[in-house]
Image (spheres, rainbow, N blue to C red):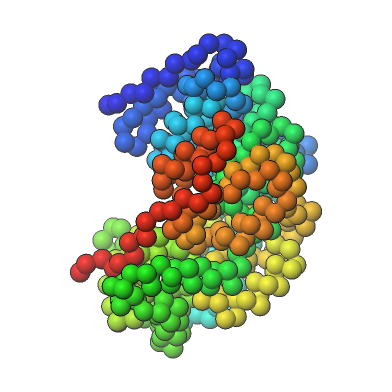
C-alpha cells in the first residue's frame, strides 16, 4: 500500500492549523485506491435547532488533513454537494488527489454536514405509501402518493425525536462557524460544489467577516434549489451543438430534442411493460411511463458521461428495445416497495424552498419543457410544511467583496451558466472561469482547474478565464 506521510511544519507556522484541535484523534486515512495519509478526526456537538432551547444535541464530524505547504492560510473547509453528500466520502472516493493538493494552502477539513456521513443520526423513513407498478398512474395521482409519503415521514421523524426545523442551510452555516471556533481559527476558506455553493452563499451572508476566500464550482443560488425547466431546455441546445460538431454522432442522434419528445409521446400513448431484473436475480414487472423517462433523464443530465448513457437509452426505446432499461432500473429501485425518504436531503431542499416568482416560472415553463417539473422532486412537496421554509430573506443573493473563484461547466445539466451568473451577481470580487465541455462534477476534469485554484490561493492573476476540454464522447455503446 502506498502511504503518503504528513509532516507538520511546526507550531505557529499555520496558526491554529498546525496542531490537533481538542478531542481530535490521529488515524490513518485510506482512500479507495489504497493510498494513505496521516490525518485527524474530530467531532463537535451542536444543538439540532438553535431556535429551540429544548432541541437535542447532535454530532458534527470531520476529518482534518494537516497542511504540508509553506503558504499561511486559514483552514479550508470542504462543503459537499447534494444536499446529502458526505465530505469525508468525497475525500475517500472522488477527490482525494484534490484534497491532498489543497493542503499546500492550509489544513483541509472534510466536513460531514449535519445528517450526513458520520454526522448522521437520522432514521430513514419507510412510509406506507406504494405507487402501483403495473397500471397506468396519472402525474397528479403519483404526486399525491409521494406527498402522502412525505407527510408520513415528517410525522415519523418528529416521533423519533428529530427536530425537523433544524435541517436547513442556516443551521448548516452555524455548524460551519462552530467548527471554525472549534479549530481556533479567526477565518476559514470555504471550498464547495453544487449544494456546497448554496451553503457557501448563505455563509457569505451570515459570517462573511470570518471567511477569507471561497472556491466554488457548479453554483446553486439561494433561490435556485428548484431548477427552471426553460434553462434545462437550453442545456439540451448546448448538447445539440456538441453533437452537431461530430458528423457520425449527428447521424445517430439527429435532433436530440426531437428524439426525446418522440419517446415521451410514445410512452404517453402506450407505456411499456418492463421485466425489471433486481439485484438478487429475481424479476418484477413495471409499467414504464413518460413520467419515468423524464425522471430518469433528470437524474442523468449532470455530466456528459451520464448523458452518454441517457441518449443511448432514448435511442433504444425509440427503436423498441427495452433490455437496457430492464437491466438498469433494478439497480436503482425495487418496483412495488414502499416509498423511502432520506431526512437531510429532503428537509434541506424544502427549507430552501422557492420564491413566489420562481414558483410561477416553474409552473408556467413546465407545461412545454422536455423534462417538465421533475428535475427537483421537492417542488411537488410545496405547501406541505410551510413552517420549514426559510423565507425570501434567506433566498436573497449574497452581496460581498470576499474573494470568490467560481468554475462553471458549459455542459452542466444541473446548475446552468445563466443561473450561475445570476447567483453570483452580488459578488464584487468574483473570478469566473468557464470550463468548456465540462459537466457538473468538474473539479478534477483538468489539471488547469487545480492550476487556477493555486493561482487564486496564492493571490496571483488568473492565466485564463476559459479552460477548454475536448468534446465529450457521447457515442452509443457498441452492441
The quadrant of the image that shows the C terminus is bottom left
Task: Indicate the position of residue 115 as horizontal and vertical percent values.
Answer: 58, 43
Write down the quadrant of residue 113 in the picture: top right
Residue 90 can be seen in this image: no
Residue lying farthest left? 479
Write down the quadrant of residue 270 in the picture: bottom left
| Numbered circles on residues, count | 0
Q: Is residue 131 above or below residue 200?
A: below
Of 206 and 452, nearer the camera is 452
Residue lying farthest bottom? 269
Q: Residue at x 51, y 42 (%)?
A: 463
Of 375 and 68, nearer the camera is 68
Q: Residue at x 50, y 62 (%)?
A: 413
The quadrant of the image that shows the N terminus is top left
Q: Residue at x 60, y 12 (%)?
A: 12
Task: Indicate the position of residue 150 as horizontal and vertical percent values.
Answer: 61, 61
Residue 478 can be seen in this image: yes
Q: Is residue 63 above or below residue 269?
A: above
Task: Indicate the position of residue 196 as horizontal and vertical percent values.
Answer: 58, 46
Of 394 and 475, nearer the camera is 475
Task: Indicate the position of residue 116 as horizontal and vertical percent values.
Answer: 54, 42
Q: Residue at x 74, y 43 (%)?
A: 400
Q: Is residue 408 above or below residue 454?
A: below
Amino acid at each position: 500500500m502506498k502511504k503518503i506521510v504528513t509532516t507538520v511544519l511546526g507550531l505557529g507556522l499555520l496558526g491554529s492549523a498546525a496542531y490537533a484541535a481538542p478531542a481530535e484523534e490521529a488515524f490513518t486515512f485510506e482512500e479507495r485506491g489504497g493510498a494513505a495519509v496521516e490525518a485527524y478526526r474530530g467531532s463537535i456537538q451542536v444543538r439540532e435547532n438553535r431556535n429551540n432551547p429544548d432541541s437535542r444535541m447532535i454530532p458534527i464530524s470531520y476529518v482534518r488533513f494537516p497542511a504540508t505547504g509553506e503558504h499561511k492560510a486559514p483552514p479550508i473547509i470542504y462543503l459537499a454537494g447534494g444536499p446529502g453528500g458526505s465530505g469525508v466520502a468525497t475525500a475517500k472516493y472522488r477527490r482525494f488527489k484534490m484534497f491532498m493538493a489543497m493542503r499546500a494552502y492550509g489544513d483541509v477539513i472534510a466536513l460531514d454536514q449535519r445528517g450526513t456521513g458520520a454526522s448522521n443520526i437520522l432514521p430513514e423513513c419507510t412510509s406506507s405509501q406504494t405507487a402501483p407498478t403495473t397500471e397506468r398512474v396519472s402525474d397528479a395521482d403519483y404526486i399525491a402518493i409521494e406527498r402522502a409519503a412525505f407527510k408520513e415521514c415528517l410525522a415519523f421523524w418528529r416521533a423519533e425525536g428529530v427536530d425537523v426545523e433544524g435541517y436547513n442551510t442556516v443551521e448548516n452555516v452555524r455548524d460551519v462557524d462552530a467548527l471554525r471556533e472549534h479549530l481556533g481559527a479567526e477565518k476559514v476558506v470555504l471550498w464547495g460544489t453544487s449544494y456546497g455553493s448554496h451553503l457557501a452563499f448563505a455563509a457569505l451572508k451570515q459570517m462573511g467577516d470570518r471567511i477569507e476566500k471561497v472556491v466554488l464550482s457548479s453554483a446553486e443560488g439561494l433561490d435556485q434549489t428548484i431548477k427552471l425547466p426553460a434553462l434545462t431546455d437550453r442545456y439540451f441546445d448546448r448538447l445539440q451543438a456538441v453533437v452537431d460538431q461530430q458528423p457520425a454522432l449527428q447521424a445517430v442522434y439527429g435532433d436530440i430534442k426531437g428524439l426525446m419528445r418522440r419517446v415521451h409521446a410514445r410512452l404517453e400513448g402506450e407505456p411499456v411493460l418492463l421485466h425489471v431484473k433486481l439485484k438478487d436475480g429475481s424479476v418484477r414487472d413495471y409499467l414504464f411511463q413518460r413520467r419515468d423517462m423524464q425522471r430518469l433523464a433528470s437524474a442523468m443530465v449532470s455530466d456528459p458521461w451520464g448523458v452518454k448513457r441517457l441518449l443511448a437509452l432514448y435511442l433504444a426505446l425509440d427503436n423498441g428495445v427495452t433490455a437496457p432499461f430492464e437491466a438498469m432500473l433494478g439497480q436503482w429501485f425495487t418496483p412495488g416497495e414502499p416509498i423511502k425518504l432520506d431526512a437531510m436531503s429532503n428537509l434541506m431542499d424544502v427549507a430552501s424552498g422557492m420564491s413566489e416568482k420562481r414558483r410561477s416560472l416553474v409552473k408556467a415553463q413546465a407545461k412545454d419543457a422536455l423534462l417538465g417539473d421533475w428535475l427537483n422532486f421537492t417542488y411537488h412537496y410545496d405547501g406541505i410544511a410551510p413552517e420549514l421554509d426559510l423565507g425570501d430573506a434567506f433566498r436573497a443573493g449574497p452581496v460581498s467583496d470576499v474573494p470568490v473563484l467560481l468554475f462553471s461547466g458549459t455542459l452542466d445539466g444541473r446548475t446552468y451558466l445563466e443561473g450561475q451568473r445570476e447567483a453570483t451577481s452580488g459578488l464584487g470580487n468574483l473570478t469566473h472561469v468557464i470550463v468548456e465541455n465540462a459537466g457538473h462534477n468538474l473539479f478534477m476534469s483538468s489539471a488547469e482547474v487545480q492550476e487556477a485554484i493555486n493561482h487564486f490561493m496564492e493571490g496571483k492573476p488568473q492565466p485564463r478565464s476559459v479552460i477548454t476540454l475536448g468534446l465529450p464522447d457521447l457515442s452509443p455503446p457498441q452492441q
